[in-house]
Amino acid sequence: MGRILHFQQLDAWKEAHQLVLMVYTMTQAFPTGEKYGLTSQMRRAAVSVPANVAEGFKRRGLNDKLRFYNIAEASLEELKYYFILAHDLAYIANRKKPMAQADTVGRLLHGLIVSTEKRVGSKK
């Protein structure tokens, strides 16, 4: 692929963005009483993943990049819990597809972090 110039070129961002779209679609069917509860929390956690990848991408310092990528990982884990909760509350019938997408994002984020950590090590 060559040099990545924009965060939109990162596979981790692309897959995280697809996860956000999935969460927004999924939460549209949640009870209206959850508008400011679980719906809001799930959407915020989901949006936080690609948003932090984008922000980290633009950071100049490698340690700054890592911090934002780690925040994205943490938000992803939070979202995985919300999938479990939504399923247990019978708001979603099956959590396999969103969990599989979250796992894909997690693997890509991990790879991005490992790659960035190697760059940090080469700067020392």
Image: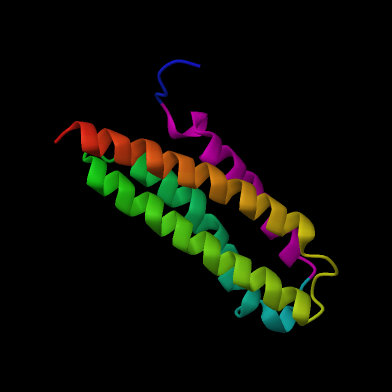
Residue 51 lies in the magenta stretch: no
Q: Which residue does the image show at 51% across and 16% down from the upper left? A: 1
Q: Which residue does the image show at 69% across and 73% down from the upper left? A: 84
- The residue furthest left is 124
Q: Position of residue 101 (x, y in %)?
A: 68, 50
- Can you see residue 20? no
Q: Quadrant of residue 37?
A: bottom right
The relative height of residue 76 versus residue 90 in the rendered view (above or below) is above
Q: Position of residue 19 (x, y in %)?
A: 64, 51
Q: Nearer the viewer, residue 107 or 74?
A: 107
- By secondary structure, the bulk of the magenta-drawn segment is best described as helix
Q: Quadrant of residue 82?
A: bottom right
Q: Which residue does the image show at 49% across and 46% down from the upper left? A: 109
The relative height of residue 95 versus residue 65 in the rendered view (above or below) is below
- The residue furthest right is 93
In the image: residue 96, left or right of residue 99:
right
Q: Quadrant of the C terminus?
A: top left
The relative height of residue 113 versus residue 95 in the rendered view (above or below) is above
Residue 13 lies in the magenta stretch: yes
Q: Which residue does the image show at 60% across and 79% down from the upper left? A: 36
Q: Nearer the viewer, residue 122 or 34?
A: 122
In the image: residue 33, left or right of residue 9:
right
Write the start and end of the magenta stretch as one range: 6-29
In the image: residue 74, left or right of residue 79:
left
- The residue furthest top is 2
Q: Nearer the viewer, residue 21 or 106?
A: 106
Q: Position of residue 100 (x, y in %)?
A: 71, 53
Picture mark count: 0
